[in-house]
């Protein structure tokens, strides 16, 4: 709830942070790839894709060295960047439902920020938070991750997603592509439903191979997603800036 001073009532709610940093949003989102955004990366994930060898290992676990910040402090940090968009990511942000995430999203939404949340497909995004979250990006796991059993059935997921939202498949190999293609062909593009994106897994799937497969198979309802930040900063510059030292 907003206080008269304009501060939010984050109370004692605290969130474990990996980083808060301004960058360009390099992946599909309703504001468009390349939009300036302030990233809030929360620590902790309930999955272990590719045996834990995922592309955000810094977000996997909350450790004794993980800085915890009050929701007020997170919002202040985001506001200081004077951005108009925020991307909440992880780890898995929805692990913090009931533990401060709603307060954070509400506070940013009430400040007029466009918000996208990247989530891993194992938890259904709460419909009521759609008031503040413009775009849910649901990363539905493909077979190579070893985590398909943990996915919310797509029928349940698509029932709550909107036309501004995405279901994304990170494709590492031919089996992943066949898996994602089968879903894309069966789902089609339901009017008012979420968009579908395929993203090549870095170092495993050549982007041209995936793009050519989508063209060959006439997957007209699929959007090709390249992580443009990895092209801009191949050595990782411009990526996470640790919040250590800020607290
Ligand atoms: S869901 Fe994301 S952060 Fe969690 S293990 Fe998979 S790729 Fe890594």
Image (tube, rainbow, N blue to C red):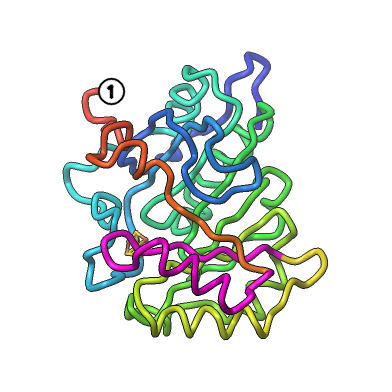
Q: Circle 1 sits in a helix, a strand or a loop, which is it? A: loop
- Which region is colored magenta? 194-220
Side of 16 relative to 53 (left or right) = right
For the residue pair 92 and 148, the one nearer the viewer reads as 148
For the residue pair 163 and 111, the one nearer the viewer reads as 163
Provide the residue designation for mark 1.
Answer: 246
Tell which quarter ligand 1 is in: bottom left
Q: Residue at the location (55% across, 80% down)?
A: 181
Query: Residue 58: horizontal and vertical position, in percent?
Result: 24, 49
If the image is split into quadrants, where does the C terminus sit? Answer: top left
Residue 52 shown in magenta: no
Side of 247 relative to 213 (left or right) = left
Query: Residue 173: horizontal and vertical position, in percent?
Result: 35, 77
Side of 7 relative to 60 (left or right) = right
Q: Residue at the location (22% across, 40% down)?
A: 235
If the image is split into quadrants, where does the N terminus sit? Answer: top right
Residue placed farthest to the top in the image?
5
Q: Is residue 208 above or below residue 6?
A: below
């Amino acid at each position: 709830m907003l206080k008269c001073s304009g501060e939010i009532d984050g109370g004692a709610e605290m969130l474990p942070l990996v980083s808060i940093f301004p960058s360009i949003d390099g992946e599909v989102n309703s504001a468009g790839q390349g939009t300036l955004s302030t990233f809030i990366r929360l620590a902790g994930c309930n999955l272990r894709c590719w045996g834990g060898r995922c592309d955000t290992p810094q977000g996997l676990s909350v450790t004794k060295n993980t800085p915890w910040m009050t929701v007020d402090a997170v919002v202040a940090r985001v506001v200081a960047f004077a951005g108009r968009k925020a991307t909440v990511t992880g780890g898995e942000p929805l692990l913090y439902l009931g533990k401060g995430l709603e307060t954070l999203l509400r506070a940013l939404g009430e400040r007029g920020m466009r918000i996208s949340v990247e989530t891993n497909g194992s938890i259904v995004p709460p419909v009521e938070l759609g008031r503040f979250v413009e775009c849910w990006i649901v990363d539905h796991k493909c077979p190579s991750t070893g985590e398909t059993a943990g996915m919310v059935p797509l029928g349940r997921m698509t029932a709550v997603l909107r036309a501004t939202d995405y279901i994304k498949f990170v494709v590492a190999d031919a089996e992943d592509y066949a898996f994602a293609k089968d879903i894309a062909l069966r789902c089609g593009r339901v009017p008012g439903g979420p968009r579908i994106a395929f993203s090549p897994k870095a170092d495993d799937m050549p982007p041209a191979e995936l793009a050519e497969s989508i063209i060959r198979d006439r997957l007209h309802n699929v959007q090709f997603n390249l992580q443009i930040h990895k092209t801009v900063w191949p050595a990782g510059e411009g990526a996470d800036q640790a919040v250590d030292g800020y607290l």
